[in-house]
Image (cartoon, grey):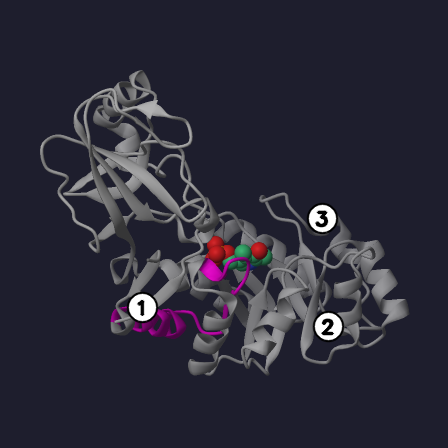
């Protein structure tokens, strides 16, 4: 009765391992919903890989990975702010590395918590957090334990920018350079170019890169015959034609949205648009659930733990107890169960 993430354990771990080989200094990122696995599971996998450091998104996630048994260094990726008491409490924690992204914050941390382990973030073309390239010259890390520079890049075409910013930073203050979203070759070039230790933060590619090793499935909980015009659901909508209401596990509490995330490829194909147009005409939207090889429309918006689908025709194509594939983004999905196959 669950939404399940099914893992081909060997293939999945092989990908995790080969990325560790390709990216020396890799730092696994375990944040948010743990990329669908949960932070605890990722912390244990990082420990299994004998990683020396893990990255979490926010200060509150530190205790979650520790509760899962993680005992080595933890980097908090979201930059420290003076109004975050949880992050501030961690400034005294010897196992935590704090990211600082504004000169005034570096100044405040230096004065209030000398010797705190600090990464200084530099703003990139992401334009999210970080000191500007012009401010590098003003960075004074003499009162903190300087762990290095942090740069967060958009996913492609950033080697030149990485080399320019990181070189300027390292020239001002030697230290490790922590990056994200570089390809293998670019990462290697950057390491050689800089001549300092580099660290590669990686989440999506590490945990979700081996797509074939992961499938999400739902369970069919009920199948009811309906004739055209028969009412169903909270909204008492009418069946657009003769067919079946199929009730499956997986609803809003799992992050199952009203429509399936279309792939880039299907966005380009007209068939999706045509199918969507037809569904719109009967007030339905395509669900992420596949029955008998096809995505089926929601009979009405998803419920908390389950969804009602509509399958037209003489045969429902499924029976109670069947497992059916669900297309979902694991970063926005909370599954009930992990199945390590
Ligand atoms: C989330 C995050 C990462 C990891 O990003 P992925 O795309 O999941 O690999 C790396 N660095 C920073 C600063 C992040 O916030």
- Residue found 16% across the figure and 46% down from its top: 318
Give the label on residue 218, or none. none
Q: Is residue 153 left or right of residue 319?
A: right
Q: Is residue 334 left or right of residue 248?
A: right
Residue 83 visible in image: yes
Question: Which quadrant would the N terminus be assigned to in this image?
Answer: bottom left
How far apart are the two marked residues, 3 and 2, measured between alpha carbons? 18 Å
Q: Is residue 31 above or below residue 237?
A: below
* Label 1 Cα neighbours within 10 Å, binned few <14 / some 14-19 / many ≥20: few
Q: Is residue 55 left or right of residue 23?
A: right
Residue with the mark numbered 3 = 132
Q: Nearer the viewer, residue 275 or 302?
A: 302
Q: Is residue 226 left or right of residue 257?
A: left
Dot 1 or dot 2: first in sequence order is: 2
Give the label on residue 339, or none. 1
- Please tell me whether residue 16 belongs to the stretch shown in magenta: yes
- Residue found 45% across the figure and 62% down from its top: 187
Q: Residue furthest left?
A: 314
* Quadrant in the picture for residue 105: bottom right
Q: Nearer the viewer, residue 79 or 254?
A: 254
Residue interval drawn in magenta = 11-35
Residue with the mark numbered 2 = 146
């Amino acid at each position: 009765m669950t939404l399940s993430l099914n893992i081909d354990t060997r293939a999945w771990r092989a990908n995790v391992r080969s990325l560790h080989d390709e990216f020396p200094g890799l730092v696994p990122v375990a944040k948010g919903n743990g990329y669908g696995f949960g932070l605890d599971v990722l912390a244990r996998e990082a420990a299994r890989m004998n990683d020396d450091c893990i990255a979490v998104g926010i200060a509150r996630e530190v205790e979650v990975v520790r509760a899962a048994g993680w005992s080595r260094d933890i980097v908090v990726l979201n930059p420290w702010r003076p109004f975050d008491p949880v992050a501030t409490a961690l400034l005294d924690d010897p196992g935590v590395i704090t990211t600082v992204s504004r000169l005034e914050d570096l100044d405040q941390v230096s004065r209030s918590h000398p010797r705190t382990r600090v990464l200084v973030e530099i703003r990139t073309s992401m334009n999210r957090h970080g000191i500007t390239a012009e401010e590098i010259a003003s960075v004074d890390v003499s009162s903190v334990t300087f762990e290095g520079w942090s740069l967060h890049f958009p996913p492609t075409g950033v080697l030149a920018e990485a080399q320019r910013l990181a070189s300027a930073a390292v020239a001002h203050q030697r230290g490790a350079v922590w990056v994200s979203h570089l390809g293998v070759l670019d990462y290697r070039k950057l390491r050689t170019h800089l001549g300092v230790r580099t660290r590669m933060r990686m989440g999506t590619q590490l945990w979700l890169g081996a797509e074939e090793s992961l499938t999400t499935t739902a369970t069919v909980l009920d199948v009811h015959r309906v004739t055209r015009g028969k009412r169903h659901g909270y909204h008492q909508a009418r069946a657009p034609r003769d067919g079946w209401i199929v009730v499956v596990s997986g609803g809003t509490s799992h992050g199952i949205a009203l429509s399936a995330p279309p792939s880039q490829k299907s966005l380009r194909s007209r068939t999706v648009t045509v199918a969507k147009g037809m569904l719109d005409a009967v007030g339905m939207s395509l669900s992420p659930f596949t029955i008998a090889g096809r995505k089926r429309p929601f009979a009405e918006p998803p419920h908390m733990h389950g969804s009602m689908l509509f399958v037209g025709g003489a045969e429902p194509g499924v029976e109670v107890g069947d497992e059916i594939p669900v297309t979902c983004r694991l970063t926005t999905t909370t599954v009930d169960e992990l199945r390590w196959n």
